[in-house]
Image (cartoon, rainbow, N blue to C red):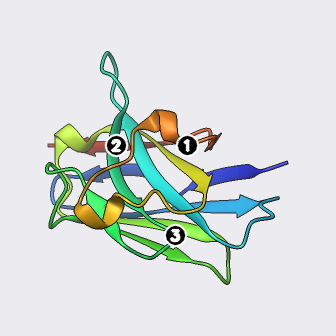
Amino acid sequence: QVQLVESGGGSVQTGGSLRLSCAVSGYTYTSYSMGWFRQAPGKQREGVAAIDADGSTSYADSVKGRFTISKDNTKNTLYLQMNSLKPEDTATYSCAAEHGSFGTVKDGILPDESEYNYWGQGTQVSVSS
């Protein structure tokens, strides 16, 4: 049973930083791709960042230069370092995982949420002005 558990959310002021973590357990594959998504109240879920099994990364235009996605395979943990946070970053952030390589992340393409089979429950991020 694959489980993804996010942590690290919280409330910060504009310009602040947070680091989200996503611990993966029960995953039997040796390589997998992962991503971060967010959903603000009244809005559709959107992709934020992805890291492919081959190590390549991609980001939404709205977070480029401010967010960094990384993965520690020895700890089975995904991270999202978020700097220079803005009120519009306020949302529930969820991590997702899928076996293997998408093959498109290296071209700067964010995989759609439908391409992931495993999801965490989410962690809330609130940025006040």
Please give the residue where the numbered disc 1 appears in the rendered image. Answer: 116
Circle 1 crowding by C-alpha within 10 Å: few under 14, some 14–19, many from 20:
some
Residue 128, position as x, y percentages in the image:
22, 42
- In primary-sequence order, the first of circles 1 and 3 is 3
Q: Relative to residue 91, is residue 6 depicted above or below?
A: below
Q: As rendered, which of 127 and 98 lies closer to the eye?
A: 98
Please give the residue where the numbered disc 2 appears in the rendered image. Answer: 47
Q: Relative to residue 49, is residue 41 depicted above or below?
A: above
Q: Look at the image and tell me whether residue 8 can be seen.
A: no
Q: As rendered, which of 18 and 100 lies closer to the eye?
A: 100
Check residue 107 in the rendering and tell me which mark sits there, or answer none. Answer: none
Query: How far, Cα to Cα, is label 2 from label 1?
Result: 11 Å
Q: Amino acid at mark 1?
A: Tyr
Q: Is residue 83 left or right of residue 114?
A: left
* Residues under numbered marks 3 and 2 in contact, where contact means CB atoms less than 8 Å apart: no
Q: Is residue 31 left or right of residue 11?
A: right
> Which image quarter is the C terminus in?
top left
Taking the spot 25% from the left edge, 43% from the top edge, the residue there is 89
Circle 3 crowding by C-alpha within 10 Å: few under 14, some 14–19, many from 20:
many
Please give the residue where the numbered disc 3 appears in the rendered image. Answer: 53
Taking the spot 64% from the left edge, 70% from the top edge, the residue there is 31
Please identify, in this view, whether the residue under mark 3 or under mark 2 is nearer the observer. 3
Query: How far, Cα to Cα, is label 1 from label 3?
Result: 13 Å
Q: As rendered, which of 37 and 117 lies closer to the eye?
A: 117
- In primary-sequence order, the first of circles 3 and 2 is 2
Q: Amino acid at mark 2?
A: Gly
Return the residue found at the far bottom: 74
- In primary-sequence order, the first of circles 2 and 1 is 2
Query: How far, Cα to Cα, is label 3 from label 2?
Result: 17 Å
Q: Is residue 57 left or right of residue 101?
A: left
Q: Amino acid at mark 3?
A: Ala
